């Protein structure tokens, strides 16, 4: 656990140092359902990270429906979607299969390249 905490702390310090040196905050976008939330300041990022740590995997659901959380992040009232709108947003099974197979192929190629490089390194010793 200490190793994970140190890694997280280093990452935060790197972000802060970059922001101080460049005088700019890296904007982050959080997608939840059809909506997006832009995190453009340190206060908003810290607030989001704290809620994300507390809520865990329920963060997406709460951003969509929890009025208190929507008020904290100034998202306005919850967006109500009908069944037809939800169906149009969902990608088809075939499209998902195509995407996954392309990702699988790319991963396989990258692994085989890496394996070839490791085999070459072993020959020199």
Image (tube, grey):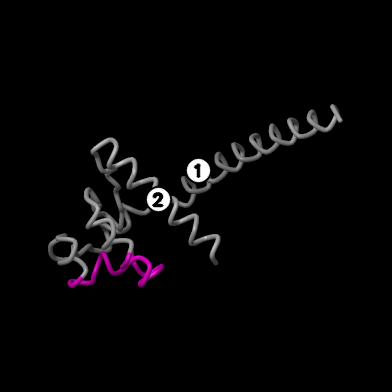
| Residue 111 place in picture, x, y as percent | 67, 38
Q: Is residue 56 magenta?
A: yes
- Badge 1 density bin: few <14, some 14–19, many ≥20, Cα 10 Å: few
Residue 98, compared with residue 35, is above or below; it is: above
Secondary element under disc 1, as helix, strand or loop, is helix
Residue 80, compared with residue 27, is above or below; it is: below
- Disc ID at residue 91: 2
Q: Is residue 62 magenta?
A: yes
Secondary element under disc 2, as helix, strand or loop, is loop
- Determine which residue is flagged by label 1: 99
Q: Which residues are magenta?
A: 50-68
Q: Quadrant of the N terminus?
A: bottom right
CA–CA distance between discs 1 and 2?
A: 11 Å
Q: Residue at x 46, y 45 (%)?
A: 95
Q: Residue at x 75, y 31 (%)?
A: 116
As rendered, which of 87 and 120 lies closer to the eye? 120
């Amino acid at each position: 656990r200490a190793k994970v905490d140190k890694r997280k702390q280093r990452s935060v310090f790197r972000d802060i140092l970059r922001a101080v040196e460049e005088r700019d905050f890296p904007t982050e976008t959080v997608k939840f359902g059809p909506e997006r939330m832009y995190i453009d300041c340190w206060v908003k990022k810290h607030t989001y990270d704290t809620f994300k740590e507390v809520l865990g995997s329920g963060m997406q659901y709460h951003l969509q429906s929890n009025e208190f959380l929507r008020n904290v992040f100034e998202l306005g009232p919850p967006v109500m979607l009908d069944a037809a709108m939800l169906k149009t947003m969902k990608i088809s099974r075939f499209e998902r299969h195509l995407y996954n197979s392309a990702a699988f192929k790319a991963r396989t190629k990258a692994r085989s390249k890496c394996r070839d490089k490791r085999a070459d390194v072993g020959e020199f010793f």
